[in-house]
Amino acid sequence: MAPKTAPATKTPGHISDQPWTLANWYQHIDWLKTTLLVIIPLVTCYFAYYTPLQRPTLIFSVLLHLWAGIGITAGYHRLWSHRSYTATLPLQLFLGLGGASALEGSIRYWSWGHRAHHRFTDTDQDPYTVHKGLWHAHMGWLLVRQDYKKHGRTDISDLSNDPFVVWQHKHYPAISITCGWILPMVVAGLGWGDWRGGLIYAGVLRVVTVQQSSFTINSLGHYLGDQPFDDRRSPRDHWISSLFSLGEGYHNFHHEFPTDYRNTTRWLTYDPNKWCIATWKWMGLASDLRTFSQNEIDKGKLQQEQKKLDGKLAVLKWGRPLKDLPVMEWDEFLVSSQDRALIVVAGLVHDLTSFVDEHPGGKSLISSGIGKDATALFNGGVYNHSNAARNLLAKYRVGIIRGGGEVEIWRLRTEKRLEQIRTRDYDYSIVGKKLAME
């Protein structure tokens, strides 16, 4: 008797594949990120209630917010994620330290997620897809443990070979805590004696405002606004999103033209990163600014406008589709015209029985074309009808004349008789008389 084998044990999957229960809810939560993004800010808000905000600290907080915000948008995003321009080492240092002070991860980590977002937009491989909800796209994806094997794979070999990016990634924990929390506290403390306010306002709460500003583009940028360049995916353009995110809100443009250092080509729209990068080029700190040609941008915009226009046209009634119209012989048309007001225009049969009395030119004019090919009359022989008249006429079409029209029918019949003459032995005098009679 063969020995019994132990039943195979099923390897438990990733926690994200399991439903939330009272027994495992804490396993679903990414406690490190939840602590940094939620718990510490909430505790800080409590202490802020008992800490007066001094004017120098407020001004310093705003300046640090701009430094961190520009570090994320012009640095992490446009420089390293999309390689929209080239920066000198001093500028890289300014942007890399500023971005780290927002505590959103290293350049390498942040850019990996963003490239996956672009490549797999609106799919389950998009780390912060809006299709899982507005909250998930905003920051919910950060607070729960995710199976990174399910995220789309992207090429970040250029970042892995960038000495500055490698250095920042290796020392990110120390850099982020120093630039994000310690530096603001030390500067405010040594500068005007506000150690506590420096940590609370210029440090922790300033980091929160930068993070929420950055997260806005992942949520509102895919939810609020219009889609002037493409509507196949969710990114949208809106000035409110742009205002919250330091100019990143023209997201439909950005997803269509991701390597462009600008987020919009309209000079009046709010895009401080575009102005900063252009200024850095003037100062010699940036070079190789990448742009899409205006021709390509205009093509995309006009194609989307045409798509929207086609959608509006599709809901209007344009008459019976040509593919659904029956084909009529000319003789059949003549017989049917005896009890209906049928006319032919451009090879199409129109039944104007219900319209004869409404004709603006009078009943007699339209009656004179019944049972005839009125193409020439309609197009200027009597009156060159307006576009509105042509649209109205299309509502009354009921068939298609085989051969196209009366004159065309005569030509086809004549060619057929001549072909018979050439291939068979006919009495030419009789055929000639028939052709003359026709």
Image: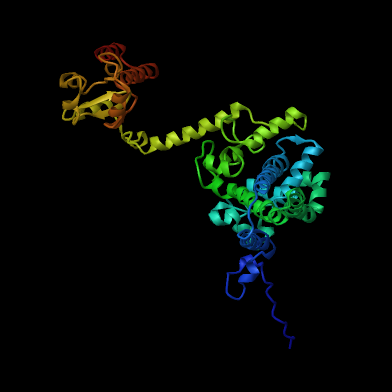
Q: Quadrant of the C terminus?
A: top left
Q: With respect to residue 269, does 387 lie above or below?
A: above
Q: Residue 43: image x %, image y %?
A: 64, 63
**Count of numbered circles in the view:** 0
**Viewer-proximal residue among 324 and 286:** 286
**Viewer-proximal residue among 380 and 153:** 153
The colour style of the image is: rainbow
Q: Quadrant of the N terminus?
A: bottom right
**Viewer-proximal residue among 64 and 313:** 64
Q: Residue at x 30, y 30 (%)?
A: 394
**Viewer-proximal residue among 221 and 345:** 221
| Left or right, 231 with reference to 192 | left
Q: Quadrant of residue 363?
A: top left
Q: Residue 319: image x %, image y %?
A: 31, 34
Q: Residue at x 63, y 55 (%)?
A: 52
Q: With respect to residue 222, does 398 lie above or below?
A: above
| Left or right, 431 with reference to 298 | left
Q: Residue at x 36, y 18 (%)?
A: 415
Query: Hey, which residue is sitting farthest bottom in the picture?
Result: 1
* Res. 237 in view: no
Q: Residue 397: image x %, image y %?
A: 28, 31
Q: With respect to residue 43, does 263 lie above or below?
A: above
* Res. 99 in view: yes
Q: Residue 109: image x %, image y %?
A: 73, 52
Q: Quadrant of residue 323?
A: top left
